[in-house]
Amino acid sequence: MTAFYEFIINIRERPDNVDFKQVDSGVHQLKGSSSSVGARRVKNVCISFKECCDVQNREGCLRCLQQVDYEYKMLKTKLQDLFNLEKQILQAGGTIPQVDIN
């Protein structure tokens, strides 16, 4: 995420000098990461973000940037809530079933 946010800062600070290939690369990486953890909403915004990069639409990229930032923060909050609930269950003596994904 750090590399993604580094070029996001660059887009916000220098919107007239956007390296669309760099943005596209970061969006592609975020989309893949989002897909691997089931973050569908983040992934869907990344698809729109990539489309804006493909046509070098600065305004569209900035809109998608705002939306991906929002979706990421929502996801982060939900995951933190989930981890806190898991911790509370364990502290109360409960167990968390393990899921075999293989």
Image (tube, rainbow, N blue to C red):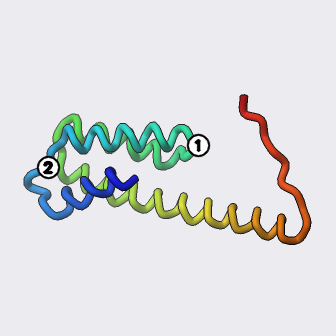
Percent across and percent down for residue 19 are 15, 44
Residue under numbered circle 2: 18
The residue positioned 31% from the left and 43% from the top of the image is 26
The residue positioned 88% from the left and 71% from the top of the image is 92
The residue positioned 40% from the left and 53% from the top of the image is 1
Left or right of 85 on screen, residue 93: right
* Crowdedness near tag 2: few (<14), some (14–19) or many (≥20) residues, C-alpha within 10 Å: many
Pick out the residue farthest to the right: 93
Q: Quadrant of the C terminus?
A: top right
Cα separation, mark 1 vs mark 2, equals 29 Å
Along the viewing direction, whichever of 21 and 97 lies nearer the viewer: 97
Percent across and percent down for residue 100 are 77, 35
Q: Of helix, strand and loop, which one carries label 1?
A: loop
Residue kind at label 2, given as amino acid type: Val
Along the viewing direction, whichever of 77 and 45 lies nearer the viewer: 77
Percent across and percent down for residue 3 are 32, 51
Along the viewing direction, whichever of 100 and 81 lies nearer the viewer: 100
Left or right of 65 on screen, residue 58: left
The residue positioned 81% from the left and 45% from the top of the image is 98
Q: Which mark, by number, is residue 60? A: none
Q: Of helix, strand and loop, which one carries label 2?
A: loop
Q: Toward which corner of the image does residue 38 lie, by quadrant?
A: top right
Residue under numbered circle 1: 38
